[in-house]
Amino acid sequence: MNLKQLKARVSYQTILLAAYALIASALLGVADLNTRDVIKLRQEEDLKASLVQVVPAELFDNDLVKDAVPVPADSELGTAETLVYLARKQGEITAAAFQLTAPDGYSGNIKMIMGLNRNGEVLGVRVIAHAETPGLGDKIEVSKSDWILNFNGRSIHNLTVKEWAVKKDGGIFDQFSGATITPRAVVNTIYKGLLFFDKHKSELFN
């Protein structure tokens, strides 16, 4: 049987396709192995950059990224579990930070990170990912507006439940002209994050 006859066989085409698939899979596997550590390192650097924005440097001397504990989140954050990063100063826990997601932004999820002190007061909140409308909803970014800084020092104990809302809903937080949905989603989710922290505060700090 010559090569031309062999190429006409279905079995030959099948084996050839399988060989290509096997080679492609092997190459992908090698690429994954070679880049996995680099990707993990970059993710840790991004996370650390976010954490230091919401936890003041004077409150910790440990590695925030590596000092984390999983905590059941249940209904507060809409996830089964969330990682809480602990800030320690000379061994004593001084603050905590965790990520949270507002699922009801105007254009989908709004991902944030929030730091809190031992009293449950907000040290800082930063939006780390969103798809809100440029020029309107993106004012939740600290690089576009100082609106997000209005949460500093707030807690569930120094504001009433009603005050934890945008002004249009009777609360104290400004909404944006033409973009109420975005700040409303952020305010509601931060409040849920505070409830989550208050529920688990004693187990985190003791």
Image: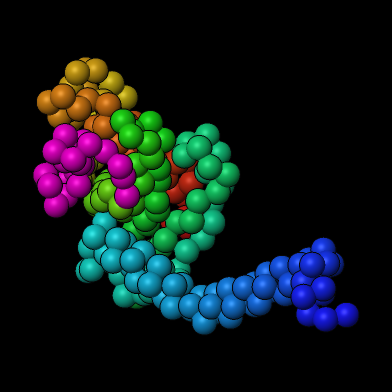
The total number of labels drawn is 0
Q: Quadrant of residue 7?
A: bottom right
Residue 135 falls inside the magenta stretch: yes
Q: Residue at x 40, y 51 (%)?
A: 99
Q: Give how far across and how far down residue 19 sits, in percent.
A: 72, 74
Q: Is residue 134 above or below residue 128?
A: above
Q: Residue at x 33, y 38 (%)?
A: 190
Residue 20 appears left or right of 63: right
Q: Magenta region: which residues?
A: 129-149
Majority SS type along the magenta span: loop
Residue 182 appears left or right of 32: left
In the rendered view of the protein, which quadrant contains the N terminus?
bottom right
Residue 156 appears left or right of 6: left
Can residue 174 be seen here? no
Q: Give how far across and how far down residue 108 sits, in percent.
A: 37, 36
Can residue 52 be seen here? yes
Q: Residue at x 28, y 48 (%)?
A: 127
Q: Give how far across and how far down residue 66 sits, in percent.
A: 45, 71
Looking at the picture, tell me which residue is in the foreground, 73 or 136.
136
Q: Quadrant of residue 24?
A: bottom right
What kind of colouring is applied to the model shown? Answer: rainbow
